[in-house]
Image (tube, rainbow, N blue to C red):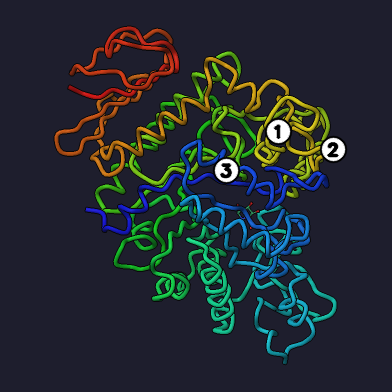
């Protein structure tokens, strides 16, 4: 049985915003906080009641805000602290919750802590980062190259697990734990309702085991952040690449007082051999991952997170379904597969109208530090054309193009030149077109989220799979007391599906009436079982 706090969290529907690309209101080509305020009613009308806001703190933007120079101030391009206070007030007035992005593993090297730290070995900040005379190991940065960089001023090497301007904080220093607790408290006092915690597994390093994550003090540090009286009520979701339920238990079991849930990324591997290389994969693979985690989290009373897309991944629809002719069917089928399961739904901006991956003919259309570094590396061993194809497939920029509100010149995002190219399919795939279409992904999402909201079986009901592992479909039930619902998602062309019960089709992406019979490819139906 889930504890009450987790049951309450099941009522959240979280809409993820990448602020830089969401809505620009001051014509500088960069999204901003007033733009988010302008769209709150839209987000609410979708059926979301919370927002995860990617970092909006002061930052030089080498990694689009994940390189923070001041945790207590707002990035100039996004607005002011007053805008932030207004955002929180406007959200709370609409009964919406704000989940901020907390980045505790590293700061920008422009942060005052780093600037002090590099001055020498005997100032109050000298041990805020990992400094060594020589690199103590051969760790690599996630963005390529060595994770150790030499700083001329200090005359030592520091660790940067990401860009060279993102220095890893040394959490073994109690002063670091304290300043990060203060950052959390600052935002809690400001009224935020929770945190998405960036690469939480990396705040304790396992130097002996040779990994820059899952170190021996990890749980002590997470507990120090979120297990306190002031923070225990918050909704917290950790970005944490666990593939093991025991590991998840250690982070999220109710009695641990650490995180509410975490993102696990098994399904992110679907459709690709590695990040930049496609692989023929199918919705069956996604289904099997989902089933595994539904079963495991239920067995251990853990709160699960449900997401298919985010700002670091090309949309799943383009990897495992049909993002062309059957885009509407694929997008809605994926929605039914993910968001009627047990857990907290996260919907990434654009997903609600079936946004797909983009495609460009030039590397100049990309901005992401990871994509640009990897492109340069790939060009050493293959033609520029082949390298660009890989970047087109795997780039994080696939999810970072300006929100396509309409087909107009700036896509309804901005009247100015946007900071990054518009989505290559923006004139066709945009919210306005979708809403005008009879087959609107947005309206399907609205109906689905309304069902979730109104039928408790979709929140706390038990989960059972009906389809077999060899079948090209995913059929499951959610049951609470006398109430039972079934969800049918078909992956193959024209399949006859005979259900072992009768019922009423309440939601369908094909105008379906009979519960059993021929299902088209990517057809889905939500059925109230009689
Ligand atoms: C994970 C974030 O989601 C990603 O965008 C960022 O580059 C890294 N962590 C480093 O903060």
Q: In the image, what residue occupies the spot 57% across and 82% down? A: 173
Q: Residue 56, position in %: x, y?
A: 67, 58
Q: Residue 508, position in %: x, y?
A: 39, 19
Q: CA distance from mark 2 to mark 1?
A: 15 Å
Number of numbered discs visible in the structure rendering:
3
Between circles 2 and 1, the one closer to the viewer is 2
Between circles 1 and 3, the one closer to the viewer is 3
The residue beneath circle 1 is 390
Which of the two discs, 2 and 1, labels the residue nearer the N terminus?
2
Which of the two discs, 1 and 3, labels the residue nearer the N terminus?
3
Q: Residue furthest left?
A: 482
Identify whether 167 is placed above or below 366. below
Q: Residue 475, position in %: x, y?
A: 30, 25
Q: In the image, what residue occupies the spot 27% across and 26% down? A: 486
Q: Is residue 140 visible?
A: no
Q: In the image, what residue occupies the spot 58% across and 73% down? A: 183
Q: Residue furthest front?
A: 93
Q: Is residue 25 visible?
A: yes
Say left or right for 440 vs 130. Answer: left
The residue beneath circle 2 is 364
Secondary element at image label 3: loop
Identify whether 469 is placed above or below 90. above
The residue beneath circle 3 is 310
């Amino acid at each position: 049985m889930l504890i009450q706090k987790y049951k309450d969290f099941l009522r959240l529907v979280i809409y993820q915003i990448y602020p830089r690309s969401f809505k620009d209101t001051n014509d500088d080509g960069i999204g901003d906080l007033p733009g988010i305020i302008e769209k709150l009613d839209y987000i609410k009308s979708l059926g979301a009641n919370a927002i995860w806001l990617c970092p909006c703190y002061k930052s030089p933007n080498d990694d689009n805000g994940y390189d923070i120079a001041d945790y207590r101030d707002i990035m100039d391009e996004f607005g002011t602290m007053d805008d932030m206070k207004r955002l929180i007030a406007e959200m709370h007035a609409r009964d919406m919750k704000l989940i901020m992005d907390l980045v505790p593993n590293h700061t920008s090297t422009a942060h005052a802590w780093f600037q002090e730290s590099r001055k020498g070995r005997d100032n109050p900040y000298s041990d805020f980062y990992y400094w060594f005379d020589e690199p103590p190991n051969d760790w690599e940065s996630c963005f390529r190259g060595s994770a150790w960089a030499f700083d001329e001023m200090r005359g030592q090497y520091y660790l940067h697990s990401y860009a060279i301007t993102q220095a890893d904080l040394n959490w073994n220093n109690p002063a670091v734990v304290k300043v990060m607790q203060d950052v959390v408290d600052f935002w809690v006092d400001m009224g935020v309702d929770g945190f998405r915690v960036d690469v939480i597994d990396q705040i304790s390093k396992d130097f002996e085991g040779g990994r820059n994550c899952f170190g021996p003090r990890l749980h002590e540090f997470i507990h120090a952040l979120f297990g306190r009286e002031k923070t225990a009520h918050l909704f917290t979701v950790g970005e944490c690449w666990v593939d093991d339920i025991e590991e998840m238990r250690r982070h999220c079991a109710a009695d641990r007082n650490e995180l509410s849930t975490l993102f696990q990324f098994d399904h992110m591997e679907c459709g690709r051999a590695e990040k930049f290389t496609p692989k023929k994969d199918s919705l069956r693979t996604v289904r099997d991952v989902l089933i595994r985690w539904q079963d495991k989290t239920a067995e251990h009373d853990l709160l699960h997170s449900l997401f298919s897309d985010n700002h670091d991944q090309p949309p799943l629809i383009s990897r495992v379904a049909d993002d062309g002719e059957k885009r509407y069917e694929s997008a809605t089928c994926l929605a039914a597969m993910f968001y009627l399961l047990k857990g907290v739904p996260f919907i990434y901006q654009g997903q609600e109208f079936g946004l797909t991956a983009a495609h460009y003919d030039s590397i100049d259309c990309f901005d992401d530090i990871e994509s640009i570094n990897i492109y340069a590396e790939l060009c050493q061993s293959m033609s520029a054309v082949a390298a660009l194809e890989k970047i087109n497939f795997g780039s994080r920029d696939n999810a970072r193009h300006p929100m396509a509100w309409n087909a107009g010149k700036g896509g309804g995002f901005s009247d100015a030149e946007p900071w990054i190219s518009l989505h290559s399919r923006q004139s066709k795939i945009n919210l306005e077109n979708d809403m005008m279409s009879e087959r609107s992904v947005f309206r399907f999402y609205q109906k689905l989220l309304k069902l979730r909201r109104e039928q408790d079986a979709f929140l706390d009901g038990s989960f059972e799979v009906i389809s077999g592992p060899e079948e090209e479909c995913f059929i499951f039930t959610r049951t609470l007391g006398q109430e039972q619902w079934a969800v049918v998602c078909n992956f193959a062309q024209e399949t006859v599906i005979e259900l072992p019960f009768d019922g009423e089709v309440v939601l369908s992406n094909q105008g379906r009436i009979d519960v059993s019979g021929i299902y088209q490819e990517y057809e889905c139906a939500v059925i109230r079982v009689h």
